[in-house]
Amino acid sequence: MSTSQTTSSPPVAKKVKHEMEMFGDVRVDNYYWLRDDSRTNPDVLAYLNQENAYTESIMSGTKHLEKQIYAEIRGRIKEDDISAPIRRGPYYYYKKTLEGKEYVQHCRRSAPTESVSVHDIMPTGPDAPPEHVILDENLKAKEHTFYKIGELRVSPNHKLIAYSEDTKGDEIFTVHVIDAETGEPVGKPLVGVTYGLEWAGDEALMYITMDSTLRPDKVWLHKLGTEQATDSCLYHEKDDMFSLDLGASESKKYIFVSSNSKITGFIFYLDVARPESGLMTLTPRLDGIDTSASHRGNHFIILRRSDEVFNSEVLACPVDNTSATTILVPHRESVKIQDVHLFADHLVLYEREKGLQRIIVYQLPAIGEPLEGLKGGRAVDFVDPIYSVDPSESQFSCSFLRYAYSSLRTPLSVYDYDMNTGTSVVKKTETVLGGFDSSNYVTERKWATAEDGTQIPISVVYHKNLVKLDGSDPLYLYGYGSYEASIDPSFNGSRLSLLDRGFVFAIAHIRGGGEMGRQWYENGKLLKKKNTFTDFISCAEYLIANKYGSKEKVCIDGRSAGGLLIGAVLNMRPDLFKAAVAGVPFVDVLTTMLDPTIPLTTSEWEEWGDPRKEEFYYYMKSYSPVDNVKAQNYPDILITAGLNDPRVLYSEPAKFVAKLRDMKTSDNLLLFKCELGAGHFSKSGRFERLELDSFMYTFILKTLNMVPAVGAEKN
């Protein structure tokens, strides 16, 4: 298996020549054998265990620091806490955490019958209605090494709870229905389910299942008390470029089923009052046009994007005549509409301009009156120069909007915003223990110039009393840059362990993400994917030139598609970085995208390109990290994987490590940590997850020679 018999020298994976030919081009993959979909091959498991043992051995001398950082991170968490309660009908619902417990309790209390306002507070104390624990994840998780609730849904009459659970990390869920008061099971569990679960009235559920490649392809209606085998399939999406999703309208009168590829999305709807009528078409399937929907009164509201209206427009159409659309909010070249939320009397847009998010609230005419162009929207005010804001669950019939706000220095805060008066009331701010003071930290927005002259936004935070900004500070640069995902500047309590050691932390908002609108994404995908990597390099060079760090102290980090970013820039510019962390990295791009049996492959061709076409084949080969490892000096590198990961097969990072070990010419660290009992998102417990943060930070500090002697750690 390996020529290495001790854990002090790195494992050497055996080479088994595997040739792959396409367009007359032959690629040799000596580590193809590391892929074992059954995850039982003794040679593969032995190699992964050797890598883990080697990593453990190398990091054994820094255990004191790892424990110290873990204690710091955990010490900032208020372990016994509750979420901001959300009022749903006759109850307040909330999640509760207990001291020392890894998982949450799902709870509710009876709510008073008076009218609801932004100033309402859930009654607590001896005279308040008693708390009822609907579901205690700690009890459920006892039998499993991994435990995750995918979705938890309360029936409209509040008598039943449906929840989906994953006990392996493979994101294949089992749905249970229980009595909300007694916790007793109702009927048999539904198996083989993926994300997407809604009540269709009080006696039926809608859910989605997947095909053999884990593509969500069928939506089902299940009547309580019947066998899953008799459930009716409402729609089967046979096109392997498309995946299904479902969600209830804010009004709860309809359930929308969407079928989406990376560039096209169309919608069906189910009338909850008449589920036997099945799905009706709301928007047609038109190549390159993407739609999502909401409902209010006698109108559907549609968010529509196409090549022409690339930042989206908002349309209204009558429920009884869905082809008669009216533009409510037109397309704007500089403003991307990200989301629409509907209320009985208001419409709320989540937008972004110049990389910053905003919320705009519009008053609507009374239900039943004509719905035409909207005017006079009011913006919600925020305090930080850069920040992150996300919708939280709001109630359709209320006049207040709930949103979550944070920044790189502001802990997560939940607000209720009165849409009639413009008043924001904070309902909950995450408690950060350990003497945290947000005024000690500075956040900034900077702009780097890319190779083609494009201005790339960078979000920066640092401790104002610890950072000198003279080039001597350690710099931690994070990036993602795929799927139109926006990595907005939000708070992370773990990160304080870096900031309080004098690090500058920065996020490179590179092309391929969605921070600057749809075209920002378009210019970082397919045959423009390399912009993602060169943008990141430009951001690193800008930060170095402006004294936020130096080559000797720049550490980089990315996960999943962000791990592809890290792998690509390590091959392109290994001289620019001191250390790199690639989490569950998508690094074997060409081999994976040529194999339609691998989960996600077919639906990803519109993101990366289809390498069965020659132009895409050679372009993808030119940046695929595994295919571009060469004999050169690489910096210190930590790579992680999850054995049960359905999104990025563990074998991709394993191959990358094996090839780097074989070819790199430097003696710098190369460590591989494969979680054998987890999937894409590491371990499942809230404290278990902190172990990876503390390990990762310890690795970074080790590479920078910032590990204090035993007994000399920070107090």
Image (spheres, helix red, strand yellow):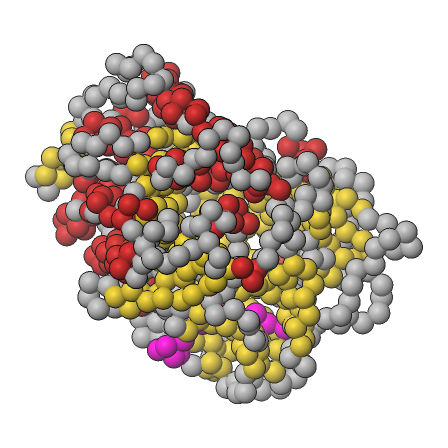
**Is 16 left or right of 492, judged from the image as shown?**
left
The x and y percentages for residue 360 are: 54, 77
The x and y percentages for residue 16 are: 20, 21
The x and y percentages for residue 278 are: 56, 58
Tell me which residue sits at (50%, 45%) in the image: 497
Q: Is residue 682 above or below residue 201?
A: above
**Is 282 left or right of 401, judged from the image as shown?**
left
Residue 341 lies in the magenta-colored region: yes
Q: Which residue occupies the foreground of this view, 242 or 415? A: 415
Residue farthest left in this picture:
24
Residue 133 lies in the magenta-colored region: no
Tell me which residue sits at (63%, 51%) in the image: 435
- Residue 143 quadrant: top right
Residue farthest top in this picture:
5
Residue 571 can be seen, yes or no: yes
**Is 336 left or right of 145, judged from the image as shown?**
left
- Residue 644 quadrant: top left
Q: Which residue occupies the foreground of this view, 317 or 345? A: 345
Tell me which residue sits at (47%, 51%) in the image: 499
Q: Which residue occupies the foreground of this view, 437 or 355? A: 437
Q: Quadrant of the N terminus?
A: top left
**Is 541 left or right of 617, judged from the image as shown?**
right
Tell me which residue sits at (37%, 69%) in the image: 517
Q: Is residue 238 above or below residue 363?
A: above
Q: Is residue 629 above or below residue 390?
A: above
Q: Which residue occupies the foreground of this view, 239 or 679? A: 679
What is the span of residues highlighted in magenta in the rendered image?
331-344
The x and y percentages for residue 670 are: 31, 31
